[in-house]
């Protein structure tokens, strides 16, 4: 994954670089510096994929709770 793909993925997840850095325990500057080399840490794509899946599950659980489908 290059830096542009990383930025697109963050937009799709509605997440800022600051939020990402906080979630993974990194300094925001370190995340931004990936843009200078156009390389993102190799664990980032799988982390983003897992985060996306977990967010979908959380959203579904909230929808079910609010709709009263499982009461």
Image (cartoon, rainbow, N blue to C red):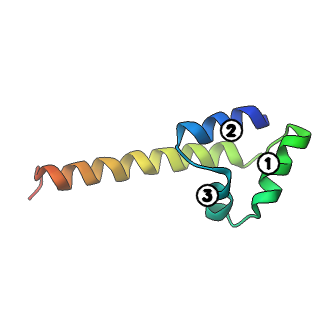
Specify few, some or many for label 2: CA neighbours under 10 Å numbering under 14, 14-19, or 20 or more.
some
Marking on residue 41:
1
Image quadrant holding the N terminus, namely: top right
Q: Which residue does the numbered mark 2 point to in the structure image? A: 7
Query: Which of the marked residues, 2 or 1, is nearer the chain's N terminus?
Result: 2
Taking the view exactly as shown, the residue that stands out farthest to the right is 37
What's the distance in space between the residues labelled 3 and 2, CA to CA? 12 Å
Q: Earlier in the sequence, mark 3 or mark 1?
A: 3
Q: In which quarter of the image is residue 2?
A: top right
At which x and y percent is residue 37?
91, 40
* Residue 46: percent from left, percent from top: 64, 45
- Where is residue 16 drawn, in percent x and y? 62, 50
Q: Residue, x 18% and y 54% (percent of image)?
A: 66
Marks 3/1: CA distance? 17 Å
Q: Do we see residue 1 in this rendering?
A: no
Q: Give residue 11's quadrant in the image.
A: top right
Using the image as rendered, state which of residue 23 and residue 47 is in the foreground: 23
Residue at screen point 61% across, 42% down:
10
Q: Distance between the residues labelled 2 and 1?
A: 13 Å
> Which image quarter holds the C terminus?
bottom left
On the picture, is 63 further left or further right than 57?
left
Quickly name the residue at label 3: 19
Above or below: residue 58 compared with residue 52:
below
Secondary-structure class at tag 1: loop
Judged from the image, the secondary structure of the residue bearing numbered disc 3 is helix
State left or right for residue 51 relative to residue 25: left
Q: Helix, strand or loop at disc 2?
A: helix
The image position of residue 26, as x and y in percent, is 74, 64
Is the residue marked by circle 1 packed among few (<14), some (14-19), or many (20+) residues within 10 Å?
A: few
């Amino acid at each position: 994954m290059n830096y542009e793909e990383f930025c697109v993925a963050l937009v799709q997840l509605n997440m800022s670089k600051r939020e990402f850095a906080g979630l993974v325990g990194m300094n925001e500057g370190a995340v931004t510096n990936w843009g200078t080399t156009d390389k993102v840490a190799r664990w980032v794509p799988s982390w983003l994929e897992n985060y996306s899946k977990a967010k979908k599950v959380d959203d579904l659980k909230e929808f079910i709770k609010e709709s009263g489908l499982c009461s």
